[in-house]
Amino acid sequence: MVGPDPTMKAGVRPAILITRPEPGAGETATRIAALGFEPLIASALTIEATAPHLPPPIAVAAVLATSGNALAACLPAFVDVPLYTVGDATAARARGMGFTQVMSASGDAAALAAMVARDRLPINGTLLLVSGQGQGVALAAALRREDFRVLRRVVYRSRPARTVSDLAADALRTERVKAALFFSAETARSFVRLIDRDGLRDTVRTVDALAIGAAAGVALQALPWRRIGVAPKPTQDAMLALLR
């Protein structure tokens, strides 16, 4: 059970800022509401699809996805190709989109590389790594060191938001926000810039910043949060457990 927050006014449901972009933000909002909090989507990034040149599915031994945002680029041609994902949330989204052979590393990019290396996919087959701009480089390098042929394609890019939403800014100023969730270091850096730009720096002193990993936690140190918590595993479940 979630206990009462002594910093909140009686009868006011504590708000949780969700800084991740859609489509993931809506799913997280549903989880937050089920925990008894008020979800406030305050996306610090927006996602834009690119137009990558992808190989024919017959030439691909498996698809590797670093995030759920990369999946749309693979539809419908690759739904029957083995798909390896970094985490369980992306795997669940992939199954819901019709992918038929989905394996999750339940961790981070290093866990995904280890999983693929352990499964020893056909060494003469190409691994198609679909990722966001600036992502997946280390993963591709790790797999190439294991003698895999990796074709990395950027299928989306993220753009920083221009401002903190009015609803989020009002909730911060009135001290209704219990915590803010950060699903990537890029999101954290963008949110820090927005807070400084919009003159909201002092409003986070009563807010807990909860990060999915160490890199996001480091980026958040630029603001005077009440505390910064880092999930013990890079999963949404581990992040939400920090709210309790």
Image: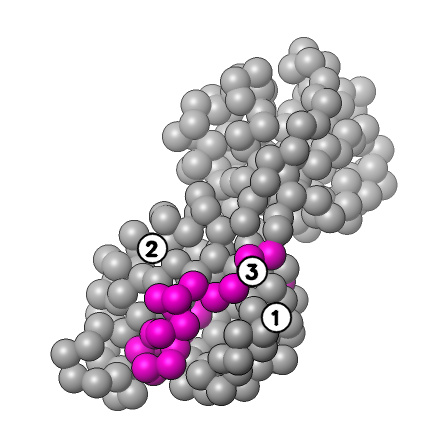
Check disc 3 and give the amino acid type. Arg
132 horizontally vs 138: left or right? left
Q: Position of residue 35 (x, y in %)?
A: 25, 63
Residue underneath mark 3: 162
Magenta stretch encompasses residue 169: yes
* Cα distance between the residues tagged 3 and 1: 10 Å
Element at label 2: helix
Residue underneath mark 2: 29
Kindly identify the residue that appears in the image at 73 percent across and 48 percent down: 134
Element at label 3: loop
* Cα distance between the residues tagged 2 and 1: 23 Å
Q: Position of residue 230 (x, y in %)?
A: 53, 71
Q: Is residue 121 visible?
A: no
37 horizontally vs 168: left or right? left
Q: Earlier in the sequence, mark 2 or mark 3?
A: 2
* Cα distance between the residues tagged 2 and 3: 21 Å
Query: In the depicted view, which residue is nearer to us: 190 or 136?
Result: 190
Check disc 2 and give the amino acid type. Ala
Query: In the depicted view, which residue is nearer to us: 32 or 193?
Result: 193
Task: Say the numbered circle drawn on residue 193.
Answer: 1
Bounds of the magenta segment:
160-185
Q: Earlier in the sequence, mark 2 or mark 1?
A: 2
- Quarter of the C terminus within the rendering: bottom left
